[in-house]
């Protein structure tokens, strides 16, 4: 074990524990409570949990020696059962932690109780629930005591040894829930046998079932000073048992969760049974049997002589020896017994006067080494505390497998290591042995164990694994080509080849995000693995490579399936359209027709390439089918699409259909004429009859156009040697049409001239228009008279003054405004931009007026004329801005309807109109008024 410190240590707990009431004869513990029995009939309770301790005299009023035979304490430290061997016969007492006086259990009078089994799962402080007692004469009893009743509730005989009457020396009980019922597991030992009982229901029912079936037991003959049975309890559940028998320590694991058949070994809830022979504990060949036993999770504490030997339960090796400091009067007998407190996790030893505490210091810290030495690797890993310990376990496993030439298995264990061996050391091991498969396995397992943030190492290892896969595939191909092993060997090789390919593709799929794209593609290309290159390209969504590969292989359908994926860019449809339609026109067009997001114009180059190839007369023209789909189903109006469809119709010698398509164009007259010209050209070039007949048909075709085409439009389509006489009738008809158009244009020109004269007359009349203003007419803004005398402050600069009057505006509706009033009203009612524009014009007009006044006093002769012209221009703009319509009768007034009565900037005025309730005066009284 670890030399840094002992696992078990001994401390003196109480030197004179019997307190002068004789010597200690027995001891029991539970939940930091120690109960001693003495040779003079005293029961002494030491409570280290903070509760009261007390001494009870069970020999009071009795003569003779009254030694305590056994004491038993429940795991909670509340209930205690004591058996006293008095001169009048054995008596059994019950006492509670709250009592100051014990109660005799009269129904047990005359019975020597050697063992007690408590129901750990159901016992409470107030009630013992069912308790099993084992007696000296081989009987098992059930008893229950409630603290408030001060006596036993009942006593039932459960079982009696008839075949081999022996004393029961140890008892243990465990329960589990099965639905609404309880399953009991009971183990009992005599000096030579271990009995097992189990069943569902009441304890009485369980033991009654053995009246008609055999009791399961294990017999180990041999002499033993004191047969003992112990359960190791962890979190209130028994995990393993140990029996101190004459032949050795019989022990094993307990499995109470297994569902056992009631007819086939239902008592076999014991697993991994083993026997520790006492010869392994002997010194100098002398076998000394232990006098007492205590059990921890991984160790046995054996009282041999005056020492306690600690034995590892798994390795069966002695790891420590514990020694005790006795008082002089206790040296003769030494340590008398051991006991354990499962609740507190402590062990105790006692001699005639003293109590010793045995503490445990992390007893499982080196168990991984114990299991590793025994090659129980799973258990060793389960007991490892840190990665370094786990690495040592993996190392031993890996080296064992490597030595056995199981290289692939060794690789799996090496891959789990992180500290002991470096990555390079491990890979060199496999390289030196030429084990490429094992090396690949190591790399793959290493990838599984690496953290995601080790990006560089993951990429490096993945790339190396890729090359090893490619090497493996090539080796399998070479083996298959040689065919040395015959047909069976070839089939096996092919099967391995296919499985390797499948595994490699799965690897590429898993590692696509960590593999370097360019490096991986170069590797695949260098090894000639085109299919895997395409597969990897599809994983990386390089669809161009994938589609190109399928086209090269002539697999148009697969290429189209790739292009149909939503993640494939639409541009690839257009790029590969020419190759695909030449490879398989039907599948290509069918694929196009399933995609509503395709732009047919971008497919025109591919369709023209297909249309330029010769086709059988009865063959379905796939391009025409697609174009008809675009026109009729998708309602496509692209001129290029219609032109191509029309030209293909024309190539099919179907002018009627071509004319019908051309006539569908309504909004674009130029396009419609262009399409009709194409049809006309085709009709003229396709006619093979006499010249006059061709001309006659061409003239008839002109009539179909409803005047859209003229004879001069189609003349270029005829041969140069055609006689003009053949077109005499059509030319004359065309000339007559032109003559009519000329006469119509003349009439329209005369009408336009007459209209222009009328407009000029109207303009002249407008210049002479005037309005009469009554002398009492008021300004619509200031409500003062329009014809009032305007002082200097009233005269706006830039305006022509009319005597002493201020400038004003008169509207046809009759409203009149002073110029400055109109400007103020309009700027107040219009939007901010327009108001700023008006004010700016007014400012410019004022500045021009000031400049004109200054210039009139100077010497220059041409500048006043320029200033007046500029002022006239600005005044005209100002007139347009403020006087285009009457502000009371035009749009400005209509827009004011939507404005609120109170503008946002006038919100403060609202509060001044609020009516607040008046507070009544102190001497006022309110009288009710009935209406």
Image (tube, helix red, strand yellow):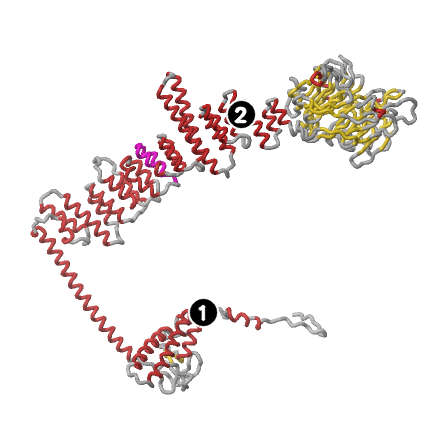
Rendered image quadrant of residue 850:
bottom left
Position of residue 264 in the picture relative to residue 605 (left or right): right
What numbered label is drawn on residue 494?
Answer: none
Rendered image quadrant of residue 897:
bottom left
Q: Which residues are magenta?
A: 546-566
Gap in angstroms between the C-alphas marked 2 and 1? 95 Å
Is residue 565 part of the magenta span, yes or no? Answer: yes
Q: Which residue is mark 2?
A: 398
Residue 753 at what x, y percent from top left?
A: 20, 70
Q: Is residue 174 visible?
A: no
At label 2, counting other C-alpha atoms closer than 10 Å, the crowd grade (few under 14, some 14-19, many 20 or more) is: many
Residue 813 at what x, y percent from top left?
A: 37, 76
Residue 712 at what x, y percent from top left?
A: 14, 54
Q: Going by the picture, which residue comes out furthest to the top?
A: 163
Task: Please identify the dominant SS of the magenta region.
Answer: helix
Q: Going 43% across and 75% down the picture, which residue do you hit?
A: 825
What numbered label is drawn on residue 897?
Answer: 1
What number of labels is visible? 2
Above or below, 459 relative to 486: below
State the SS at label 2: helix
Residue 824 at what x, y percent from top left?
A: 43, 76
Q: Is residue 352 visible?
A: yes
Please name which of the two marks, 2 or 1, marks the residue nearer to the observer: 2
Is residue 892 part of the magenta span, yes or no? Answer: no
Q: Going 32% across and 77% down the picture, which residue do you hit?
A: 870
Position of residue 41 in the picture relative to residue 313 (left or right): right
Q: Quadrant of the C terminus?
A: bottom right
State the SS at label 1: helix
Position of residue 576 in the picture relative to residue 137 (left or right): left
Q: Quadrant of the N terminus?
A: top right
Which one is in front, 839 or 308?
A: 308
């Amino acid at each position: 074990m670890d030399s840094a410190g002992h696992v078990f240590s001994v401390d003196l707990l109480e030197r004179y524990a019997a307190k002068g009431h004789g010597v200690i004869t027995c001891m029991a513990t539970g939940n930091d409570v120690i109960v001693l029995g003495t040779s003079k009939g005293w029961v002494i309770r030491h409570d280290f949990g903070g509760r009261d301790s007390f001494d009870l005299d069970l020999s009071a009023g009795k003569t003779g020696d009254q030694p305590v035979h056994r004491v038993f304490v429940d795991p909670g430290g509340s209930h205690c059962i004591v058996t006293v061997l008095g001169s009048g016969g054995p008596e059994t007492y019950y006492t509670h932690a709250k009592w100051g006086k014990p109660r005799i259990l009269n129904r047990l009078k005359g019975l020597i109780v050697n063992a007690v089994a408590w129901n750990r799962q159901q016992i409470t402080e107030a009630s013992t629930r069912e308790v099993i007692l084992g007696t000296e004469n081989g009987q098992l009893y059930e008893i229950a005591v409630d603290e408030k009743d001060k006596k036993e509730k009942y006593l039932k005989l459960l079982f009696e040894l008839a075949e081999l009457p022996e004393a029961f020396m140890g008892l243990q009980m465990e329960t589990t829930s099965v639905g609404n019922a309880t399953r009991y597991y009971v183990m009992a030992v005599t000096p030579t046998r271990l009995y097992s009982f189990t069943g569902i229901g009441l304890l009485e029912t369980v033991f009654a079932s053995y009246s008609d079936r055999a009791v399961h037991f294990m017999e180990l003959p041999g002499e033993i000073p004191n047969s003992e049975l112990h359960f190791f309890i962890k979190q209130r559940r028994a995990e393993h048992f140990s029996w101190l028998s004459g032949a050795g320590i019989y022990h094993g694991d307990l499995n109470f969760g297994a569902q056992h058949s009631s007819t086939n070994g239902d008592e076999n809830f014991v697993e991994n049974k083993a026997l520790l022979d006492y010869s392994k504990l002997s010194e100098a060949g002398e076998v000394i049997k232990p006098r007492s036993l205590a059990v921890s999770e991984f160790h046995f504490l054996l009282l041999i002589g005056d020492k306690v030997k600690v034995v590892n339960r798994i390795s069966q090796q002695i790891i420590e020896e514990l020694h005790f400091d006795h008082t002089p009067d206790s040296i003769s007998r030494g340590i008398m017994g051991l006991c354990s407190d499962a609740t507190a996790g402590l062990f105790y030893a006692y001699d005639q006067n003293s109590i010793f505490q045995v503490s445990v210091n992390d007893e499982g810290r080196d168990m991984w080494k114990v299991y590793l030495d025994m090659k129980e690797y799973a258990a060793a890993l389960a007991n490892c505390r840190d990665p370094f310990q786990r690495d040592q376990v993996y190392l031993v496993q890996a080296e064992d497998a490597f030595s056995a030439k199981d290289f692939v298995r060794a690789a799996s264990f090496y891959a789990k290591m992180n500290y002991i061996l470096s990555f390079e050391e491990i890979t060199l091991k496999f390289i030196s042995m030429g084990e490429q498969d094992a090396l690949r396995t190591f790399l793959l397992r290493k990838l599984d164990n690496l953290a995601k943030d080790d990006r560089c190492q993951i990429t490096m290892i993945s790339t190396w694994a890729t090359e090893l896969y490619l090497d493996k595939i090539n080796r399998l191909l070479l083996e298959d080509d040689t065919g040395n092993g015959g047909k069976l060997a070839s089939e096996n090789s092919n099967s391995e080849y296919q499985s390797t390919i499948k595994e490699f593709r799965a690897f590429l799929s898993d590692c696509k995000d960590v593999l370097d794209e360019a490096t991986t593609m170069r590797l695949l290309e260098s090894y000639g693995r085109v299919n895997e290159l395409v597969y990897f390209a599809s994983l990386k969504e390089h669809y161009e490579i994938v589609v190109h590969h399928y086209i090269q292989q002539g697999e148009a359908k697969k290429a189209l399936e790739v292009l149909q994926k939503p993640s494939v860019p639409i541009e690839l449809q257009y790029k590969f359209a020419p190759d695909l339609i030449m490879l398989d026109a039907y599948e290509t067009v069918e694929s196009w027709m399933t995609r509503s997001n395709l732009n047919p114009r971008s497919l025109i180059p591919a369709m023209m390439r297909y249309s330029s190839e010769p086709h059988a007369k009865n063959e379905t023209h796939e391009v025409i089918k697609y174009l008809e789909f675009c026109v009729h189903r998708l309602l496509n109006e692209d001129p290029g699409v219609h032109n191509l469809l029309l030209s293909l119709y024309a190539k099919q010698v179907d002018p009627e259909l071509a004319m019908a398509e051309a006539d569908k164009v309504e909004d674009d007259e130029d396009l419609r004429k262009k399409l009709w010209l194409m049809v006309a050209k085709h009709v003229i070039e396709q006619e093979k009859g006499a010249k006059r007949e061709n001309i006659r048909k061409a003239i008839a075709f002109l009539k179909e156009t409803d005047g859209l085409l003229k004879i001069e439009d189609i003349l270029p389509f005829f041969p140069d040697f055609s006689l003009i006489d053949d077109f005499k009738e059509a030319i004359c008809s065309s000339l007559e049409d032109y003559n009519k158009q000329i006469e119509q244009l003349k009439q329209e020109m005369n009408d336009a001239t007459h209209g222009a004269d009328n407009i000029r007359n109207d303009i002249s009349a407008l210049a002479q228009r005037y309005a009469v203003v009554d002398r009492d007419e008021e300004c619509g803004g200031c409500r003062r008279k329009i014809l009032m005398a305007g002082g200097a402050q009233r005269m706006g600069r830039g305006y022509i003054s009319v005597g002493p009057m201020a400038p004003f505006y008169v509207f046809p509706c009759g409203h009149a405004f002073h110029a400055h009033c109109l400007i103020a009203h309009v700027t107040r009612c219009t939007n901010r931009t327009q108001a700023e524009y008006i004010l700016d014009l007014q400012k410019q007009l004022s500045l021009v007026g000031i400049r004109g006044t200054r210039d009139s006093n100077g010497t220059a002769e041409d500048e006043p004329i320029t200033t007046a012209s500029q002022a006239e221009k600005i005044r005209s703009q100002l007139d347009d801005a403020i006087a285009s319509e009457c502000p009371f009768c035009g749009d400005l007034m209509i827009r004011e309807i939507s404005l609120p009565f109170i503008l946002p900037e006038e919100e403060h005025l609202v509060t001044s109109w609020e009516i607040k309730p008046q507070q009544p005066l102190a001497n006022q009284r309110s009288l009710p008024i009935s209406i």
